[in-house]
Image: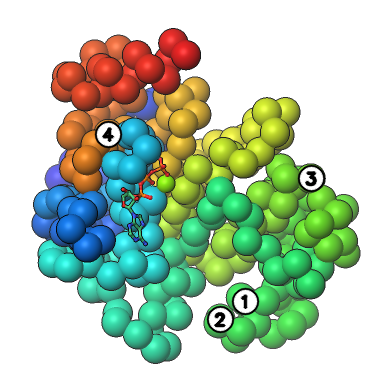
Amino acid sequence: MSEVSVTKSDKGPAPAGDPLVVLDNVNKHFGALHVLQDIDLTIRRGEVVVVIGPSGSGKSTLCRTINRLETVDSGSIAIDGKPLPQEGRELARLRADVGMVFQSFNLFAHKTVLENVMLGQTKVRRTEKKAAEEKARALLDRVGVGTQADKYPAQLSGGQQQRVAIARALAMDPKVMLFDEPTSALDPEMINEVLEVMQQLARDGMTMVVVTHEMGFARSAANRVVFMADGRIVEEAEPNQFFNNPRSDRAKDFLSKILHH
Ligand SMILES: Nc1ncnc2c1ncn2[C@@H]1O[C@H](COP(=O)(O)OP(=O)(O)OP(=O)(O)O)[C@@H](O)[C@H]1O
Ligand SMILES: [Mg+2]
């Protein structure tokens, strides 16, 4: 393997990090529906992978298997060289290593913004309260909502809540961050403030898997685009190549629909 390091802004090949998330021949069914079919996917440390594809193609399920919100029927998933644990304390630790941000922000409504970002640190990582609070405040500043720390989620805009959700995931020092359509539920004027936080995270070297319809983000932040259809990875390529020269008919058809609607 080459030792040359490549920064995101070069948008060249994927960074030459070691494999961090490895899916090997993963299959999953929901009843008769074969929702993940022979999925082989390796995400290297520091790599930003954008997953796109039609509704129902299995993008969310793929994300959910990576932090074991869903089990798989066959094949294996390893994070940082270790197979996904089945249950118990090990599973809680894995969930902390794999940060997840959903379309719906999933903040605790009855806790303040600050408490939301402290909770995982004190409960799962066993961080002392004072240190957890310092870290939470620093992260809230980093995502631009430091002044909202003492409010409750419902008092924030959608874009602010989603940035809190990102801060909460980051507070666990995750090895990889999964984003499942993080801007889809937001009013248009709030989309950019969330994408900018994600862009910065990518520039800082976070390993990221991002399901999104934001093709501008894919073009500027992704090292690689993975295109899924009917439970399969149909095509994967660097963003420029994928958007300018999609190889498969499925990808051409999908792109023509989303880029010209
Ligand atoms: N818990 C479940 N039980 C049964 N079927 C499910 C379940 N979750 C997802 N499915 C089905 O699996 C398929 C893949 O769903 P998934 O949510 O992964 O797709 P997606 O690519 O994320 O779609 P979207 O773009 O609409 O979010 C769909 O046909 C969906 O209806
Ligand atoms: Mg989905």
For the point 27% across and 18% down, which residue is it?
253
Question: Could you say where residue 170 lies in the image, as x and y percent from the top left?
Answer: 58, 60
Q: Is residue 104 left or right of residue 248?
A: right
The earlier-in-sequence mark between 2 and 3 is 2
Q: Quadrant of residue 129?
A: bottom right
Q: Crowdedness of circle 4 by 10 Å Cα count: few (<14), some, many (20+)?
A: many
Label 1: state its secondary structure.
Answer: helix
Amino acid tagged 4: Phe
For the point 34% across and 19% down, which residue is it?
255
Q: Which mark is residue 121?
A: 1
The earlier-in-sequence mark between 1 and 4 is 1
Q: Crowdedness of circle 1 by 10 Å Cα count: few (<14), some, many (20+)?
A: many
In this view, the residue farthest toward the front is 32
Amino acid tagged 3: Ser
Which residue in the protein does label 4 denote?
A: 227
The reply to whether dot 1 and dot 2 touch (C-beta < 8 Å) is yes
In this view, the residue farthest toward the bottom is 88
Which residue in the protein does label 3 denote?
A: 157
Which quadrant of the rendered structure holds the N terminus? top left
C-alpha separation, residue under disc 3 versus residue under disc 4 = 31 Å
Which residue in the protein does label 2 denote?
A: 125
Question: Could you say where residue 218 lies in the image, as x and y percent from the top left?
Answer: 43, 29
Picture layout, residue 58 above or below residue 113: above
